[in-house]
Image: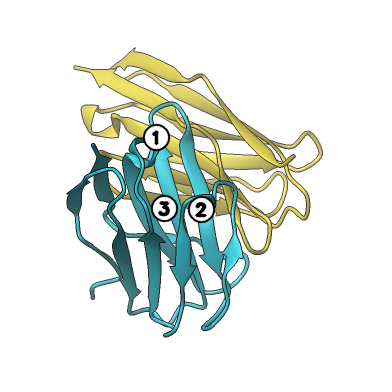
Chain colours: A yellow, B cyan
Amino acid sequence: EDKVVQSPLSLVVHEGDTVTLNCSYEVTNFRSLLWYKQEKKAPTFLFMLTSSGIEKKSGRLSSILDKKELFSILNITATQTGDSAVYLCASYTGNQFYFGTGTSLTVIP
Amino acid sequence: NAGVTQTPKFRVLKTGQSMTLLCAQDMNHEYMYWYRQDPGMGLRLIHYSVGEGTTAKGEVPDGYNVSRLKKQNFLLGLESAAPSQTSVYFCASSYYAVTEAFFGQGTRLTVV
């Protein structure tokens, strides 16, 4: 059975902290690993990773994939209250996206 | 620059009623998906389509039907709504394999 597991389920930090979100996957015909941010409404795309060991970076966010150990991490440095959201990880198999249940991040001023 | 548009945004149904959710995308994407999102369950795939005239079952297809008569539209139907179908429904589309999915704004459906 294909599955994507995210941890922790929820996280509360103070502004300025650094957080690491985890995503492990077990899917057949893996093609890519994606991260999304969801604030109340539609998930918005953050990163897509297809190769191991190559970090993708956008501002204070970065992500990396390990295809041998079947996991990915999303790092957020110098967190801000605007980073409060649910972060979703998804594995794409060529015709379907399998989503984890998400990590709810709350950043306290 | 609409992207993926879902209608309606909110709906309340009585048990046993039927309805159709419409998803329209203007990005010429081949693949389209319907998900439901429930607390603690993440996004679960209901049905998907890899091209005009094609549909396939996802993880939780029971109680739903879909149609993709035009490339830009993907319809999700509930023939006889049940309270268990109370959820937020998201439509998404993607160009081909190994590309990200773009999501609509969601439809909040309550079945009473």
- The residue indicated by pointer 1 is B38
- Which chain is home to disc 1? B
Q: Is residue B112 left or right of residue A68?
A: left
Residue B75, given in percent of the width and then of the height, sits at: 38, 69
- The residue indicated by pointer 3 is A45
Near mark 3 (Cα within 10 A), the count class, few <14, some 14-19 or many ≥20, is some
Instruction: Name the quadrant containing residue A6.
Output: top right
Q: Is residue B106 above or below residue A102?
A: below
Q: Is there CB contact under 8 Å for labels 1 and 2?
A: no
Do marks 3 and 2 share a subunit?
Answer: no
Q: Is residue A32 above or below residue A15?
A: below
Near mark 1 (Cα within 10 A), the count class, few <14, some 14-19 or many ≥20, is some
The residue positioned 50% from the left and 25% from the top of the image is A20
Question: Which SS class for mark 3?
Answer: strand
Do marks 1 and 2 share a subunit?
Answer: yes
The three-letter amino acid code for the residue at tag 1 is Asp
Query: How far apart in space, not on screen, are marks 1 and 2 (Cα)?
Result: 13 Å
Residue B6, given in percent of the width and then of the height, sits at: 27, 63
Circle nearer the viewer, 1 or 3 = 1
- The residue indicated by pointer 2 is B46
Question: Which SS class for mark 2?
Answer: strand
- Which chain is home to disc 3? A
- Can see residue A28? yes
The three-letter amino acid code for the residue at tag 2 is Ile
Query: How far apart in space, not on screen, are marks 1 and 3 (Cα)?
Result: 20 Å
The extreme front residue here reads B16
The residue nearer to you, when weighing B91 against A9, is B91
- Which chain is home to disc 2? B
